[in-house]
Image (cartoon, rainbow, N blue to C red):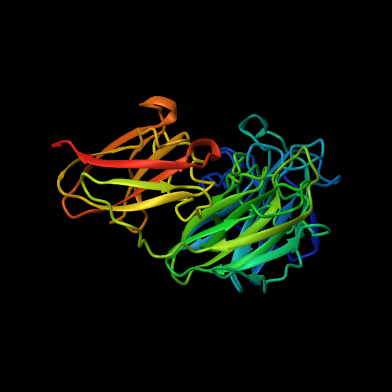
Amino acid sequence: MSKQGVDCAQQVVNTTEGLMPSTMLLSSCYADNHVGFTGALAYSIVGKGNEIILSTCNSRSEISSSIRVFSDNYNKGYCVAGSSYFSSCSTETNSGVVSFLAESDKEYTVLVSGGSSSYENGKRGIIALDVICPEKNLTMKSLDCGSSHTDSTIGLEPSSLLYPYCHMDSSVGFLGSFSYSLIGDGKEVIVSTCNSKDDFFNPSIRVYYKNWGRLECVTGSTSYYGCRNGQKSVVSFIAKYGVEYEVIISSGDYSKRGQGNFQLDVFCPKTFDVEQVFDGEEIIGSTVNSTPSSLQLPYCGGADSSSGFSGSSSYKYIGEGQEVFLSTCSSYTNFDTAIRVFNRDTQIPSCVSTSTTSLCSQGRTVASFYGEEGSEYEIIISGKYGMQGNYKLSVFSAER
């Protein structure tokens, strides 16, 4: 395949008229498998350890187009990035735009073809490709456990514009974003903007790691956000040892100002070392002013994903090879409670049982699970919908 070399800050204009479908059998790469049947323009670009944005969003492009980027991985065309069916441009033509992290000295093949969906494959014509290499500060601000950062997205360029979809809408961040770097140590990390004071800026959080030269989504805040003081954001993830993560803060709300000031706090929950409870025991406790150490444990059945955002209480239980019941059905319990149980024997805690349905009066609840002999479980008491209060937890087996 004959390829034309391209470089940063360059626009190349060519036509797909008369091209043969030489790219027909390449693997699917985000774009529809059929895109390219009418032939494609082939380009080559060598990475410099930088982000590259490829766009046909310009007035010189006369037809809709799709972009696909491949690297040579074990002599196969490995898909790095590709435009989807949906327009990424504000132009009349349904043109394409993609971005990827180009490893130093690695050659990438860029295929640009007419049609952004299977309905437009027959189109041929002139396509102008812009190659953009954002000037991005690769020495991003470092995040450490227990650190707090007050920063702003005001005036920032949209360097993270084309990062892969990560729970937030792909267009979030068009007005610029702030990036941080975090090196994993094999533990859970909680990242929060809940303490931000700017009432007119609702920041979202996205976390990525580098995989085969492209960024992969690890986690991101959703429209539920999770903070008590308005639509701020909080996420957590298991940061693998030695792996570098990029944490991106950008706008999370179309209806308000797209840029603003924020406070980013980083928490690393301590090793699971909490009070142990036993069969037949009753515990008096409170979630008032408790810290959200178990905030971002995995989703656990029917429990609302936001349960625990306002803090929670955790207990350890060692299985005895029998079914165990947990209950907050007591007149002492004065708020709507949720109970979640996780198996702590695995690296990432797994959900075992949950109950947020009011199985007794006034929002108190019951959960049960089978405790495997010798297995370690975490029992979490939290309030539904951000509630806090006092509770009495009863632990008893089916034999009682």
Q: Nearer the viewer, residue 379 or 329?
A: 329
In the picture, residue 37 is in which quadrant?
top right
Residue 90 visible, this angle: yes
228 sits to left or right of 340:
right
Q: Nearer the viewer, residue 247 or 336?
A: 336
Q: Which residue, as the protein is rendered here, is positioned at the far right?
A: 59
- Identify the residue shown where x is 33% and y is 57%: 275
Is residue 85 found left or right of 10 in the rendered image?
left
> Which quarter of the image is occupied by the C terminus?
top left
Q: Residue at 61% of width from left, 32% of height from top?
A: 118
Vertical arrangement, residue 185 with respect to residue 247, above or below: below
Q: Quick check: 184 above or below 333?
A: below
Kindly give the residue lying farthest to the front in the view shown: 332
Q: Is residue 11 left or right of residue 96?
A: right
Q: Residue 286's spot in the image, x, y percent?
A: 45, 47
Place of residue 221 in the rendered image (x, y in percent of width and height, measured from the top left): 59, 47
In the image, residue 141 sits, relative to residue 68, either above or below, namely below
Query: As displayed, is residue 369 above or below residue 234?
Result: above
Residue 355 at x, y percent in the picture: 37, 34
Residue 281 percent across, percent down from the top left: 25, 46
**Residue at left 51%, top 48%?**
288
- Name the residue located 53 percent from the left edge and 52 percent from the top edge: 289
Report the number of numbered marks: 0
Any part of residue 2 in sight: no
Quarter of the image that includes the N terminus? bottom right
